[in-house]
Amino acid sequence: MHIGGVLRVYHPRVAKALPLLVDSPHSGRVYPDDFGFSCPRQALQVYEDRFVDLLLSNLPHLGVTTIQAEAPRTYIDLNRAVDDIWPMQLRDVWNGPFKLRPSVNCDRGTGLIWTHAGDQPIYREAPTSAAVLARIETQYWPYYEVLGREVGALKSRFGKVWHLNMHSMPPHTNNGQYDVVLGDLDGTSCDPAFTNAIRQAFEANGLSVVLNRPYKGAHLTRTVGQPDQMSESLQIELSKGLYLQNDLITLNRDKFMKLQNVVEAVVMAAAVYAKTELSKTAGNDSINALSSSAIGTLTPKA
């Protein structure tokens, strides 16, 4: 499925499908004509989760459904609440159908509609409320509609779904320079055992991992992560230093291939975890949908 300039969905073959959904909301590189930014494009590109979508490109062959945003996060940030807008950042008075509730993200210029890329203003003239509403209608709601549909489809088939929300982070953060940050909203968006399984999979591949520091998970993790509704979500932040050049824009192909193999190994661990959890449910026919042959195909490329 493809909505041009908005998102792409990749489905596995039905026989290989797993109860896993992976999305990349911040890796979009299609800059809309109506963006209207006045800063250099490179100032925006360094805030993309650059090429994370390419890291996920093999996952549908392994049985995983993937969703990838196409517009950049600086145009509209899909990992924010729809009302996370500061009224003063608009060119005119807000006239939308809901009240605005700006969060601390707006103080940094990184709410639903970014106003700054670091210290650099993105616009000479702020967007109008009509322009913001158009972005919400064409980008935000379609993404959440598709996400909800895919979550529902996997829950209907398997009885439960596990969601990995994929991101990348600057190589030097205040987390002690770990390779990976896992965010489960302090143990509330998924079973801690799932977080631990993913952590162990990364560590088994030589990467250092920290939990919930400084990234606990945000709106997407909170939305999908409803364990009492058989839907678990974990945010994964990968250091850009693992696969990009020092400019944080250009791909390092050797590093990229290694990290892609690691991502596939982590997905394999998630699939094994999911099968084990589903098998614990007595009389759950959904385990029949998760065939051992599907698990057996989850072998990362050498």
Image (cartoon, rainbow, N blue to C red):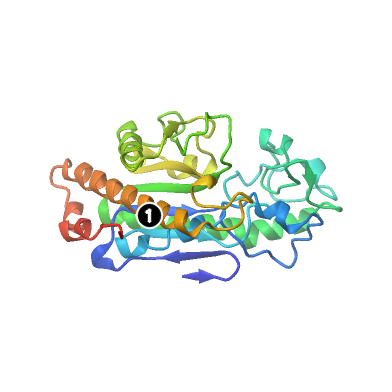
Q: How far across and how far down the image is residue 191, in percent?
A: 33, 34
Q: How far across and how far down the image is residue 290, in percent?
A: 21, 56
Give the residue at mark 1. 152
Q: Which structural element holds mark 1?
A: helix
User: Does 161 appear above or below 66?
Assistant: above
What residue appears at the point 86 percent right and 53 percent down from the top-left corner? 125
Image position of 280 (left or right of 57): left
Q: How far across and how far down the image is residue 139, in percent?
A: 61, 60
Image position of 233 (left or right of 128): left
What residue appears at the point 23 percent right and 66 percent down from the top-left corner? 15
Image position of 246 (left or right of 65): right
Quarter of the image where the C terminus is located: bottom left
Q: Residue furthest left?
A: 283
Q: How far across and how far down the image is residue 193, in percent?
A: 30, 33
Three-letter code, disc 1: Gly
Count of labels in the image: 1
Question: Tag 1: Cα neighbours inside 10 Å, few (<14), some, or many (≥20)?
Answer: some
Instruction: Please state which of residues 146 and 242 is positioned toward the viewer in this rendering.
Output: 242
